[in-house]
Image (tube, rainbow, N blue to C red):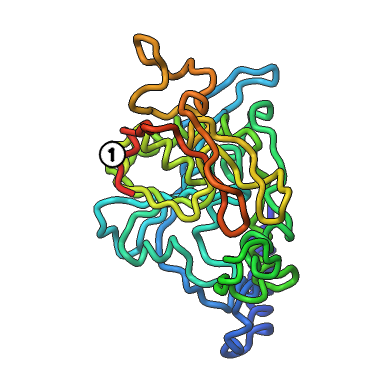
């Protein structure tokens, strides 16, 4: 342990070093852009707030190593410094391969989504989905992991699709700051946010259903759910399981395309897909009307092939400018639970 005299000496050295390194007023604005804004001399554009963290849900599982916690959901609570003025909170769900950092400041250090809603007086919650980030799982069997992204995937899919030109609409892409290419500082900051994600979306959906509804029940006030990409699975499932606790659902670039993922098996650049989400918009059971099961109790949990029961069939010719899609047979079944939630 440091003695009091040693601690005071170190503190004085830090003060002296600070005065030496930053004499007077700090220099030009560009020296506080991007990662340079990490400097203590740089002010922040983020909204003033209080922060708390919680873990919601989860349960103990006895293993040969001892009792481990599975399925816990990391939740960050941001409260406006001036107080909450909106009646319903907002919960953010990130996409695949990243974490709740998506909703904080942008890669070029501009104000992010969280601050925008804090300024409007909302209570804000940001989750790291079960199995990733600060919600990482001890369950190494059910949650195998893969890489979150590569520079090439990010360039082609997010930051510079106009360069790859895999589909005609890519030329309309103009909003990404900087070049959108590797070694550009904004791109590099964005690429650094990627982390491994699980390949077992079924296990993740089941754990998010349990912990997500537990979170909503703790809030006791219906919340708005805002999601991006594959994160759109979770507001859908919570709308199915506990719709009375959901005030509304906003899904940005949702990646739960019915019955398929628009990745893989490409014979022509900009096309190709692989079958997934047998329940249409999810990998796990959704409540349909009419029910899929013909049993007397209409228990859909035992339906062996829900996509076949729904009559999923491919419609259209798959082309870069207009992708083919899967639809139910007529008359299509409805999702009565999900329909209770405004979108």
- Judged from this view, the residue extending furthest toward the top is 296
Residue at image location 66% in from the left, 51% down from the top: 271
What x and y, as percent, mark residue 10? 68, 68
* Residue of label 1: 340
Query: Relative to residue 80, is residue 110 drawn left or right?
Result: right
Q: Nearer the viewer, residue 14 or 55?
A: 55
Residue at image location 41% in from the left, 58% down from the top: 50
Q: Image quarter for residue 31? A: bottom right
What x and y, as percent, mark residue 92? 44, 51
Query: Relative to residue 219, is residue 145 drawn left or right?
Result: right
- Judged from this view, the residue extending furthest toward the front is 317
Q: Can residue 300 be seen from the camera position used here? A: yes
Q: Can residue 58 be seen from the camera position used here? A: no
Query: Relative to residue 276, is residue 293 drawn left or right?
Result: left
Residue at image location 48% in from the left, 35% down from the top: 280
Judged from the image, the secondary structure of the residue bearing numbered disc 1 is helix
What x and y, as percent, mark residue 263? 65, 47
Q: Is residue 76 above or below residue 141?
A: below
Q: Nearer the viewer, residue 92 or 273?
A: 273
Q: Image quarter for residue 32? A: bottom right
What x and y, as percent, mark residue 297? 35, 11
């Amino acid at each position: 342990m440091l003695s009091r005299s040693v601690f005071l000496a170190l503190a004085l050295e830090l003060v002296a070093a600070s005065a030496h390194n930053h004499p007077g007023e700090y220099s030009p604005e560009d020296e506080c852009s991007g990662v340079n804004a990490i400097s203590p001399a740089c002010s922040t554009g983020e909204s003033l707030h209080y922060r708390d963290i919680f873990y919601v849900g989860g349960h103990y599982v006895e293993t040969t190593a001892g009792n481990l916690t599975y399925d816990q959901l990391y939740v960050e609570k941001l409260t406006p410094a001036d107080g909450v003025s909106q009646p319903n909170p907002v919960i953010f769900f990130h996409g695949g391969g990243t974490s709740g950092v998506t909703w904080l400041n942008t890669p070029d250090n501009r104000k992010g989504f969280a601050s925008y809603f804090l300024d409007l007086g909302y209570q804000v919650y940001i989750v790291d989905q079960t199995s990733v980030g600060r919600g990482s799982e001890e369950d190494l069997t059910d949650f195998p992991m893969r890489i979150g992204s590569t520079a090439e995937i990010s360039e082609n899919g997010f930051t510079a699709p106009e360069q790859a030109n895999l589909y005609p609409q890519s030329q309309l892409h103009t909003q990404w700051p900087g070049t959108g290419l590797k070694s550009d500082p904004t791109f590099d900051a964005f690429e650094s946010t990627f982390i491994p994600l699980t390949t077992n979306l079924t296990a993740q959906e089941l754990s998010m259903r349990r912990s997500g509804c537990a979170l909503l029940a703790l809030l006791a006030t219906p919340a708005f759910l805002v999601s991006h990409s594959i994160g759109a699975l979770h507001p859908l499932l919570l709308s199915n399981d506990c719709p009375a606790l959901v005030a509304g659902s906003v899904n940005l670039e949702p990646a739960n395309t019915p019955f398929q993922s628009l990745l893989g098996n490409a014979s022509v650049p900009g096309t190709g897909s692989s079958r997934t989400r047998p329940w249409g918009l999810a990998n796990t059971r959704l409540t349909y009307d009419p029910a899929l099961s013909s049993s007397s109790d209409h228990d859909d949990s035992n339906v062996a092939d829900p996509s076949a029961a729904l009559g999923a069939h491919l419609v259209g010719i798959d082309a870069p400018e207009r992708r083919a899609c899967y639809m139910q047979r007529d008359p299509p079944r409805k999702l009565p639970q999900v329909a209770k939630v405004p979108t």
